[in-house]
Image (spheres, rainbow, N blue to C red):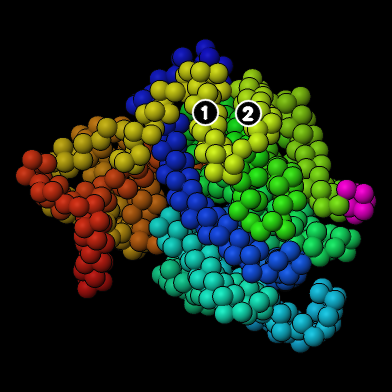
Amino acid sequence: MPKRRRQEQQHDHPGGSGAILGVRVLRYSGVQGTTLVLSNLIQLVSVMVVAAYLGPSEMGRFALLLFLAGLVTQLLSLLVKPGTIRRTFGGGDDEDDEDEDDEAVSSTPQRTLGTGLAWAAALGALGTAVVVILREPIAELLLGDPDDGILVVWAAVLAGFWLVFKLADIVLWLERRPGAFVVSDTTRPVLGLAALVALLSAGAGLEGAIAATAIGTAVAAVVAVVLLLGSFEPSFDFGEIRQIIVRGGHRAPIVSSFWIVQNADVFILSRIVSDTDLGIYALASRLGFVVSFLPQGFRVAMRPLRKSAAFKAVGDQYGRSTVQGQLLGYFAVLCIFAVLAMVLGGKVLVDIAPSSYADAAGLIPFTAAAFVMPSIYRTVNQNVNLSHKRALFIAGCVGAALAFIGLTVVLAPEIGTYAAPIGMLVGFGIPSLLMFARNQTGAKPIDFPYRAVGVALLLAAAIAAGFQLLELSALVELVLAVVLLGLFLVALVPLGVIPRYHRGPLLHTVRSLGRGTPANFRARRGLRALEPGEREELRIAVIAGLPAVRLAPEAGEGLRLVGFLRRVGERGGIPVGRPSALDAELAVYLFEDTAQAVRDASMRRLLSAGAESNDLRALEDLVTYLARVPDDGWEGRPAAERGTTLPGVERRRRAQRRRALRRAQGRR
């Protein structure tokens, strides 16, 4: 963003709508970060457990079984996951399409989701059955021995449950239910590790390793579906299944290309290198893949927010090119930090593994850099303004897959397992650079912070080069790596990577995390603007929600509730805009007791009808904040009369109030 424009902007509170989005990004990224830290730590332990018990050769065979399960899951996923997400939530799935087609969105999202989950379960069972029937020829092709059919059976079971888990897990995130998502996403690695330790310590060997992974995934799939109860209607509609397949069909080349680049490396190398070298590469690639979750976590955190009113408001206030440039710039710095972390920590991690894996140390920096490339390509695509962008993106995906396969096959006989990460770097690096360069020389370039990203890259390279010259014990290297990573982050401020005009809003954003909004809203004062009966009416709508029939424009109740909400906001210190002709429809978006997918559809209709995005954002924030107000606040009592309540107790009380109010609404 040009400095002059920044100085001219006026905000209703420090940081403007950017700070509001920043709070949400940090909170969602915090949830993603918590999940990623937990799951990745557990995955690291799992990798080390498998490596210690199996050795390099069996580790390579284990990686091939995971490849088989992933391949079956991916093929079946094309028929259900992208189409279900598109029909339920609108927009795309993995690469965050922005070309929302209202005709592609179901008029009954809950029923569509129910059909999608049932279709995933049916496909999972069918795919498992087919692989079990063909287990001997698959075992001979993949593992070189038809007698290993039982291993293929366990891989098939893993694939069937993995399909259901992938769909249910991403739906929880898109519904903006971070707590449920954390439970779902961590259940799989936790249970998988517990089963791994139990079976491998009992001497179950390779079969125990793949069986443990299948068991953990099966239980996690059940947990994820249970957490979704209430968000879907049980259904198996053949007409809807057809729509799911059709709407997801155009995603096949995109999803397949990404999957091939990220997962086919083990299979391709298995045709060229020895089982021992393959096992060493499997360890390096799985450790390198761990660090890719940092940029992936940021991208996934942004996925539901891009469909929110807060994101629309930021674009309206600052301009699309500025928002795109800043997001891409900070994402690039995050990728640099992620790769630096693995470069510094790679040798330490390998030292923990058995000595037979020592050659993995040199591979880890390459695999770390390679596995962030798919996220970089997706994020570049997400933040550029090009005509025919979808066609270019698909061409880049297919080209990346072909380049990866070709380079790996050609280079592997010469440089061994290093060929695969080099193929990934070249495959996605070239289309990323071409797409970015074409955008910056076109009619709508983005405001990308070239200097800041360049400084961060040079700083990381200097730290990595200096660290490689040191020869210290593993413990000292680990401590030094942590210190150097901290210094890298601290140095971003004086070096100007985080510019001066961002520091104040960023600090304000961090301080605002506890409140959930940067605005200084005084809820009790705001609620005293209403009469007791009006407060009770608004409390029921905010905490329990109302059925759509009561919020219909002709009923008049919704219009009255939005009026109450505006009065509370103005009195409490949050500017919420003036009444508009769309307030009756706005009430449906704010107060309807329904799934998030239905509310997102309501928001899209409002924006299409001319509603102000900042107005929607402010009122939505206000409803979220009021839902956390204790009972005595709704009764109009000042804060001085309130007793001290532990946060966990207060959360349980809010849940109890919500259930009680919903039961009362049902009796009416």
* Disc number placed over residue 487 in the picture, else none: 1
Spot occupied by residue 602 in the image (x, y as percentages of width and height): 46, 52
In the rendered view, tell whether residue 645 sits above or below residue 658: above
Q: In which quadrant of the rendered view does residue 126 lie? A: bottom right
Q: Secondary structure at mark 1?
A: helix
Residue in the image at 86% along x and 52% along y: 416
N-term-proximal mark, 2 vs 1: 2
Q: Could you tell me what secondary structure mostly forms the magenta stretch?
A: helix
Query: From which residue to which does the magenta span run?
Result: 407-415
Spot occupied by residue 127 in the image (x, y as percentages of width and height): 70, 79
The residue type indicated by label 2 comes to Ile
> Residue lying furthest top in this view?
4
Marks 2/1 in contact by CB < 8 Å: the verdict is: yes
Residue 340 or residue 355, whichever sits in front? 355
Spot occupied by residue 81 in the image (x, y as percentages of width and height): 63, 65
Residue 103 or residue 344, whichever sits in front? 344
In the rendered view, tell whether residue 479 sits above or below residue 32: above
Q: Quadrant of the N terminus?
A: top right
- Asked if residue 106 lies left or right of residue 630, the reply is right
Mark 2–mark 1 distance (CA, rounded to whole Å):
10 Å
Q: Quadrant of the C terminus?
A: bottom left
Residue in the image at 48% along x and 62% along y: 186
